[in-house]
Amino acid sequence: MSSNDSLARLAAIIETRKPANGGDPGTSYVARLLERGPDAFLKKIGEEATEAVMAAKDADHGGDRQKLVNEVADLWFHTMIALAHYGLKPADVIAELERREGTSGIEEKALRKAQGRVNNAD
């Protein structure tokens, strides 16, 4: 079983939790975040990103590396809620990562920057 399968299963569960799909904000954390709108889940993404950074810094100094795994899991989970809100799936992110495979990060960043200049000139 691939990690992509695990992400797809979690994404499917998140879809069922959307209030528009019958998710109950009274009993579902995901439904509650989605009902509150982007500010709620985007704030959680920021919090989880900060916690992941702090866990990584702690791991640099002998802290529990599992804490980093836990915080990254929380970050991924909340970003998956954002993807669902915007009609996207983990497969969309994986496809983008696969598209970038074999391309230097420096080259990729330069390409995106150049594309941004072209798009802004239009």
Image (cartoon, rainbow, N blue to C red):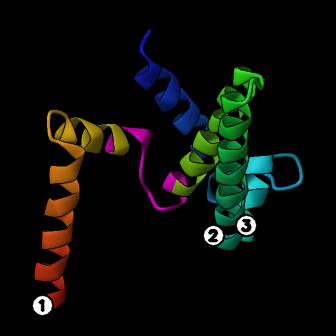
In depth, the one of 95 and 49 nearer the eye is 49
Q: Which residue is farthest bottom? A: 122
Choose the circle earlier in sequence order: 3 or 1.
3
Residue at x 42% of width, y 14% of height? 2
Q: Which residue is mark 3?
A: 40
In this rendering, the answer to whether 80 lies above or below 91 is: below
**Which amino acid type is shown beneath numbered disc 3?**
Ala
* Rendering coords of residue 121 (x, y %): 12, 90
Residue 25 drawn in magenta: no
Quadrant assignment, res 97: top left
| Quarter of the image where the N terminus is located | top left
Q: Say if residue 85 shows up in the picture.
A: yes
Q: Which residue is mark 1?
A: 121
| Quarter of the image where the C terminus is located | bottom left
Q: Which residue is farthest front? A: 61
SS under mark 2: helix
Q: Residues within 10 Å of mark 2 (few under 14, many from 20)?
A: some
Residue at x 75% of width, y 28% of height? 67
- Confirm or deny contact between disc 2 and disc 3 (CB under 8 A): yes
In this rendering, the answer to whether 10 lies above or below 76 is: above
Stretch in magenta: 83-92
Q: CA distance from mark 1 to mark 2?
A: 30 Å
**76 lies left or right of 46:** left
